Amino acid sequence: MSDKTESVSTLENAMQLMIQTFHKYSGDEGDKYTLSRAELKVMLTTELGNYLGNAQDKNAVDKVMADLDANGDGEVDFTEFIILVGALTVACNDFFLEYNEKGEKKK
Amino acid sequence: MSDKTESVSTLENAMQLMIQTFHKYSGDEGDKYTLSRAELKVMLTTELGNYLGNAQDKNAVDKVMADLDANGDGEVDFTEFIILVGALTVACNDFFLEYNEKGEKKK
């Protein structure tokens, strides 16, 4: 619907995009509401290729899965996914701040 | 730049929107890289009015500040902000799943 009366804020838009992204991949196989190892790999490669570089590398996917899968069931649930995205966003923010500070010192 | 060669994925877009939103409000007063109580209130009211309802209510802002401000300095830093957004996103996702399940049972 393009003629919604309630406008969506930038932050609400970001939240909706994260929810949409998870469900785009989680529905492919097995439990509709979790990412299997295969679904996680497709998600990492497609959505975070620029950040994670070689998620093609099987070890990289295994490492992310081991770090995220807190309850050890071999599936990443939505909360575990949000923890990954949150940690990456904090890392990106730190990177940009450091980059900006270096730029300001040069002036 | 609208003619970027590197395309940004949906998830990367969401991450950038969260970073942009924080800095839009954090630069108003005091420390450029943290949200003061006043900045937090403007952010909550403007960005999350639909979710939080009466953030106009001073008590609501105080409660969010107390919950988020882990180190007790009266400022919300970027990591604390991401924890809030992550928790809200998980809550929204739970709500939509529950809503969908109810819809499916009705069929």
Image (tube, coloured by chain):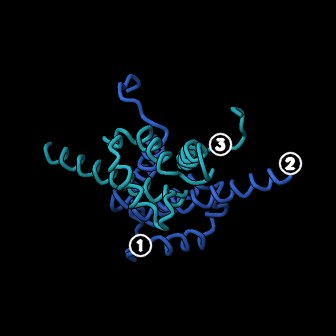
Chain colours: A cyan, B blue
- Residue where numbered disc 3 is placed: A7
Residue B25 higher or lower than A27, as above or below:
below
Q: Which residue is mark 1?
A: B74
Host chain of mark 2? B
- When asked about the image quadrant of residue B32, the answer is bottom left
Q: Which residue is mark 2?
A: B107
* Residue B45 spot, x, y in % from top left: 58, 57
Instruction: State the separation of the CA atoms marked 2 and 1.
Output: 50 Å
Residue at coordinates 86% horizontally, 48% vertically from top-left?
B107
Disc 2 residue type?
Answer: Lys
Q: Which amino acid lies under the numbered mark 1 shown in the image of this protein?
A: Gly
Alpha carbon separation for disc pair 3 and 2 = 31 Å
Q: Secondary structure at mark 2?
A: loop
Please give the name of the residue rendered at 41% of the width and 73% of the height, measured from the top-left corner: B74
Q: Assess whether mark 3 and mark 1 are in contact (beta carbons under 8 angstroms).
A: no
Question: What secondary structure is marked by label 3?
Answer: loop
Q: Amino acid at mark 3?
A: Ser
